Image: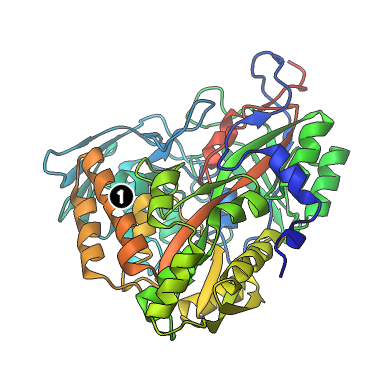
Amino acid sequence: MNRRALLGAAVAALLALSACGGGGGARGPSEPVGEPRPGGSLVLHMPSEISTNINPLDQTDPAAQGVVSGTVYSKLVDFRTGPDVTTLEVVPDLAESWEIAPDGLTYTFHLRDDVRWQDVAPVSGRPFTSDDVVATFEAVKQVPAQHAWMFEPVNAITAPDEHTVVFTLDRPYSPLLEYLAYHFNVIMPREGVEGQFDLATQAIGTGPFILESHTPDVEWVLRRNPDYFVPDRPYLDEIRMPILSDTAAVTAALRSGRLDVGTTSDAVVAEEFSSRGGFTVTETPGAPISFYLNPTVEPLDDIRVRKAVMQAIDWVGMGENIRGAFELTSLLRPDTSPAALTRDEVLALRPFDPEAARRLLAEAGLPNGFSTSLLVQRVDDEDVREAQWMQADLAEVGIQVEIEIVDPATGIDRRRNHDFAMTKALRGVHLPDQVWRDFNPESIENYALVNDPQLNEMVERSRAAVDDAARADIYRQMQERMETEIVQALYPIQKFDYAIANERVQDLWSSPIYQGKRLADVWLSDVEP
């Protein structure tokens, strides 16, 4: 197969849009538009309908997080957003301050005393107190939810008074603050936790917006919370979130003005709107591409064969020609962790070296290569084109690959059941510790069956490390071990996504997680002051 034939006419547009390894920043109108003003309705693209429900306790659907996390529900702490944000920084939300004991075993949070629940029955605008926080996290730890493990070291949550909450741990656990800021971990009223209303269909929070209505497969609508605890926020009266899964429908709605903000991973579409005027296109780091090798399938049970596979693929060429904008990565994301390996470090550990790959295959008794399969979870066309690029590279060293394309639900099920030889997909992980959780022997997301005692010991040391620099050093060592001694799972490149906004939309700051609170800062420049 001629790989260049896969690229087509889109390559020139891709490379014109952004250089290899680039990212961040916006292109569009830069003239001053005045001071923020209240009012107006924002129409914000929602790529898919929620697959389950909106109960924060029992679902992990990204679409659900995009509707309620940070918008309807607040959190104890949050990640800062704004024009100058380049890393994940934990800032106050419902907790205005906190202290961590020197031994790392006690976290004391001091809550705001001016917060009320949204004026929706049966909570009906009563004051928010520490009892709601206790009720929320007691439920999180008791319900068999996928994210309960984030608080496994917490053995007690108490409320000394109405505006103080104390988390007591059985061992130091450095990721706790980041997990408290993560989009899953919103604070719910005790009434919801105790079943006085249905959390699956109704959301009552302390956030800047109230859930107004939902028309299945059509639209979600949020309206302004007049009792939000941040003065003068939110600016918007309303957010409408139409569900549009087709790129052509999104672009048509943006062109006609029926949609204010749309998202895409298609660099050609982004370039079109960047060139036409009247829009701001913001390029932001997206999900990593994950690649897993099943060590129970011959000959991938031989580490020399797994290393040969990794070194036979030109990951840089794939990123340049398929995604256009990308980061060469190991496992941690550069946009969320300073411990992510640099491009040069990755290239030293995982060089593109077909000759070395052939030697490794010969050493493993496979001088003529072998045949295998690659399971591809398709979200967009780039997923398939990447698989074809990998197929062509592997054929050059004698590895014949049959590609099998499946939908996301099937892909997740097949990976969780280890029903593959090799597989690739997008992997929506953000926080460093969350990455390593994937490779815990007991995790259902441990697709590649990683079970390395030394790696497990390093994970525990990283969690106990209270010094950021020491923890980052452990993370770098863990990535090196995954690249050289385990070689069963990597996130070899990180793609970029594009937010396309009508020029009337102001202060819509990007975020690597589902950060709904940022919508409280958005305002529309064409609303009459």
The x and y percentages for residue 250 are 79, 49
The x and y percentages for residue 237 are 68, 32
Q: Is residue 57 visible?
A: no
Which residue is denoted by mark 1 in the rendering? 476
Q: Which residue is at the front of the view, 118 or 207?
A: 207
Q: Which corner quadrant of the image does residue 481 belong to?
A: bottom left
Q: Which residue is at the front of the view, 169 or 112?
A: 169
Is 289 above or below relative to 182?
A: below
- Residue depicted at 64% across the width and 64% down the height: 389
Colouring chosen for the image of the structure: rainbow
The x and y percentages for residue 20 are 59, 42
Identify the secondary structure beneath mark 1: helix
The x and y percentages for residue 519 are 59, 35
- Residue depicted at 55% across the width and 82% down the height: 372
Q: Which residue is at the front of the view, 105 or 359?
A: 359
Q: Which corner quadrant of the image does residue 246 belong to?
A: bottom right
Q: Which residue is at the front of the view, 397 or 83?
A: 397
User: How many neighbours does mark 1 have within 10 angstroms: few (below 14), some (14-19), or many (20 or more)?
Assistant: some
At label 1, the amino acid type is Arg
Q: Is residue 523 visible?
A: yes
Q: As drawn, is 359 to the left or to the right of 473?
A: right
Is 395 above or below relative to 109?
A: below
- Residue depicted at 39% across the width and 36% down the height: 94
Q: Which corner quadrant of the image does residue 336 belong to?
A: top left
Q: Give the position of the C terminus as an image quadrant.
A: top right
- Residue depicted at 67% across the width and 40% down the height: 499
